[in-house]
Image: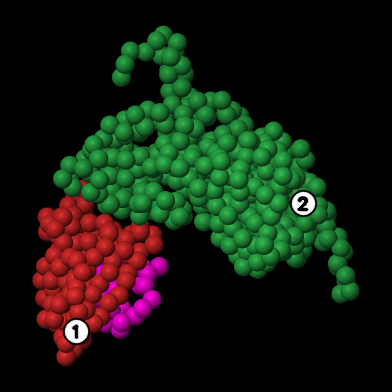
Amino acid sequence: MNAHTHSSLESDIKNHLNVQRWRHDFPILQTRLYGKTLVYLDNAATTQKPYTVMEAENHYYRYDNANVHRGIHTLSQRATEAFEYARVALQHLMNAQYAHEIIFVRGTTEAINLVAQSYGRSRFKAGDEIIVSGMEHHSNIVPWQMLCKQVGAILRVIPVDDAGELDRNTYDALLCQRTKLVAITHVSNTLGTINPVKRMIDAAHAHHIPVLLDGAQAIAHLPVDVQDLDCDFYAFSGHKLYGPTGIGVLYGKSALLDDMPPYQGGGDMISSVSFEATTYNKLPYKFEAGTPNIAGVVGVGAAANYLNSIGFDAIVGHEQALLSYATELISEIPGLRIIGNASNKTGILSFVLQGLHPHDIGTFLDRQGIAVRTGHHCTMPLMERFGVPATVRASFALYNTISEVDKLAEAIYQVKEVFK
Amino acid sequence: MNDLRELYQDLIFDHYRQPRNYGPLEHANRKAEGYNPLCGDKISLAMIVKDGVISDIRFEGVGCAISTASASLMTESLKGKDEGEALNMLKDFQALVTGVAVPDAMGKLTVLAGVQAFPQRVKCATLAWHTMQAALKNTTEPVSTE
């Protein structure tokens, strides 16, 4: 490496100490595989969990377990308090105006299906248009295709350019009277591209079109402020936020959610039921039918508090340093092509190696203790766009280190040697 | 690292870099497409079957080292076999790569036995074989490993 200036050396040391401290919070990082310490670089698929999340779930089951919003007994009251406390933690994480704008769902996928089937199905008609982008995860494509089939609406797609950025001019041209919703990803899970969503939301709102953001890849890696963005819906999964699987959030503006019919019927989502008529409960309970994943909610609340305690300045600073170091190092490898070179990215590096299939690379890296994702990353249209069947994807989280990036690069050189 | 060497033997590399019986086949009367959506591997298989015997067989497609070498080795071992023998070899091959059994008389195909240490890669190794089975039935729907 080049000589550092005094101040950047100081910040490097501070950064190093931070990362070492954060790593202690994640017991799984001590795992040894095939005689090597685990290098976990599949964070875009799911992140590892800190003690605080595991302890929160454990504490809930050990001391507070009961059903929520029902019992008059003490445990039920404690469970309800823990559940609603988590809702407030998530409200703060994304700076929502009200806690009742946070709807607990299974994950990003269910959040998007909820909006498609509740908001879309009750309002959209034949000939209406929904805009998505060419870099969407299948979970932000298929629910809209299903809705289009049901109501006769049409899906429009914003193209992706060679660098992996959305084509602004086409987007502006697609917005029209027929457009009823824009549903785009905040950050691409395959390319790492951070889309200029604030500008895109402003443009949609100029036509009175609401916008849903798929925040699955953004929420743990960027500060998200839904009021500043002014997005109408924001969806994410707890497990990509250092929280448990099977729990996620749909944020929706209060006025929109109020006007929407329920997504599922059952207990908790009603005020009164008779065989003649049912009155639905108020927000957020209208959308939370049945006994929820209480421990999951408690866990994701703990994850939100964990991130808030570290702060996004430190997280973004560290992950951007990893990304630029890794990009430089990996680019030097002969025959390696990075897929996704947007000017504004999170810590995601997708690449292909000439003459080598991603699956063979993935198997080789696995035996070096390095976990990466290989495949199409649930973005088959995007793979088609870049003319590759699959990529290798390394994705970073706050606990990854420069030395882990070095190990990745070394292992890629080795696999090239083996396959020479 | 030993199981990696076991998986990626020289013969596998050889058939990956220079797949045998690769390219289109004129006058084929049995054809099928195979697809592994998990890794994007695609294979087109074409055969000439005369009086129940596979007289010629060729394949095309993109895939990883394991799926390409497996397809190449399969085409070599199936030439001259009748349909019943081919289907029996499919069963034996599946047993080999899943580690259920070590069938006799597998010839060069035993080089793929290393796959059993890598359960995630069994689909790579068997894609060509499933496609062959579909081709014998002349299935028009592409075969998927999923």
Of A278 and B130, nearer the camera is: B130
Could you say whether the residue bearing mark 1 is in a helix, strand or loop? strand
Q: Residue A292's x, y, as percent?
A: 68, 56
Q: Residue B102's x, y, as percent?
A: 18, 72
Of A126 and A212, nearer the camera is: A126
Q: Is residue B121 visible?
A: yes
User: Residue type at mark 1?
Assistant: Val
Quadrant where the image shows the N terminus of chain A: top left
Q: Drawn colour of chain B? A: red
Q: Is residue A118 visible?
A: no
Q: Residue at x 56, y 45 (%)?
A: A170
Place residue A340 in its image quadrant: top left
The part of the chain drawn in magenta is B125-146
| Above or below, comparing residue A381 to residue A20 in the picture | below
Q: Residue at x 83, y 57 (%)?
A: A281
| Above or below, comparing residue A9 to residue A263 in the picture | above
Place residue B29 in its image quadrant: bottom left
Label disc, if present, on residue B49 of the rendered structure: 1
Name, please, the residue furthest toward the top: A6
Q: Residue B72's x, y, as percent?
A: 17, 66
User: Residue type at mark 2?
Assistant: Leu
Is A416 within the magenta?
no
Q: Chain of mark 1?
A: B
Mark 2 or mark 1, whichever is nearer to me: 1
Q: Drawn colour of chain A? A: green
Determine which residue is flagged by label 2. Answer: A257
Of A55 and A177, nearer the camera is: A177
Q: Could you tell whether A4 is left or right of A252 in the image?
A: left
Marks 2 and 1 on same chain: no
